[in-house]
Image (cartoon, helix red, strand yellow):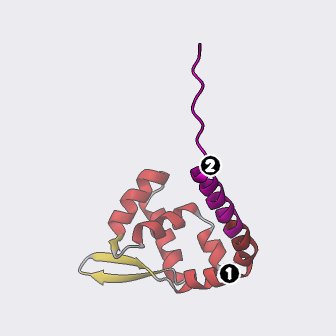
Amino acid sequence: MHAFDVLGDPVRRRILELIHAGEVTSGAVAEVIRAEFAISQPAVSQHLKVLRDNGFATVRTEGTRRLYRVDTTPLREVDQWLAIFRRNWTPHLDALATEIARGKRQRRNAPTTPKESAS
């Protein structure tokens, strides 16, 4: 499965958000996903399996618990692919930031005029 096929599913993206900071039990993941997406526990397990099988997540067994965490390797590959396109929008965003800063500087340096009193 292609990385964008994996990431194209909102449930899988949300699971990655849940497990990005460290190990999370499959039960904790299922609890959040079931509440947010109204899907069954077996459906959550299938999404975890897709993430695992495609290298986006690793699993470690601890007793009866399965602990999931993000594997960033495929995400780095996606980022490298996006870098080709990032070159198209980065200069525009840099130019926008420059213009915003210039406008703030002009407002800050503009002479202040006293307000006219209403009579």
Say which amino acid is labelled 1. Answer: Ala
Q: Specify the quadrant of the image occupied by residue 59.
A: bottom left
Q: CA distance from mark 2 to mark 1?
A: 40 Å
Q: Is residue 62 left or right of residue 8?
A: left
Q: Compared to 92, does 85 lie above or below?
A: below
Q: Nearer the viewer, mark 2 or mark 1?
A: 2
Q: Residues within 10 Å of mark 2 (few under 14, many from 20)?
A: few
Q: Nearer the viewer, residue 114 or 7?
A: 114
Give the quadrant of the C terminus.
Answer: top right
Question: Which label is found at residue 110?
Answer: 2
Q: Specify the quadrant of the image occupied by residue 79.
A: bottom right
Q: Compared to 108, does 82 lie above or below?
A: below
Element under disc 2: loop
User: Residue 110 placed where, x, y %?
Assistant: 62, 48
Residue at the spot x=53%, y=67% of the render?
12
User: Residue 28 placed where, x, y %?
Assistant: 33, 64
Residue at the spot x=60%, y=57% of the render?
105
Furthest residue in direction left, as rendered: 63
Give the quadrant of the N terminus.
Answer: bottom right
Question: Does 82 lie within the magenta span?
Answer: no
Which segment did they paint magenta? 94-119
Say which amino acid is labelled 2. Answer: Ala
Question: Which label is found at residue 83?
Answer: 1
Q: Is residue 53 left or right of residue 70?
A: right
Q: Residues within 10 Å of mark 1 (few under 14, many from 20)?
A: few
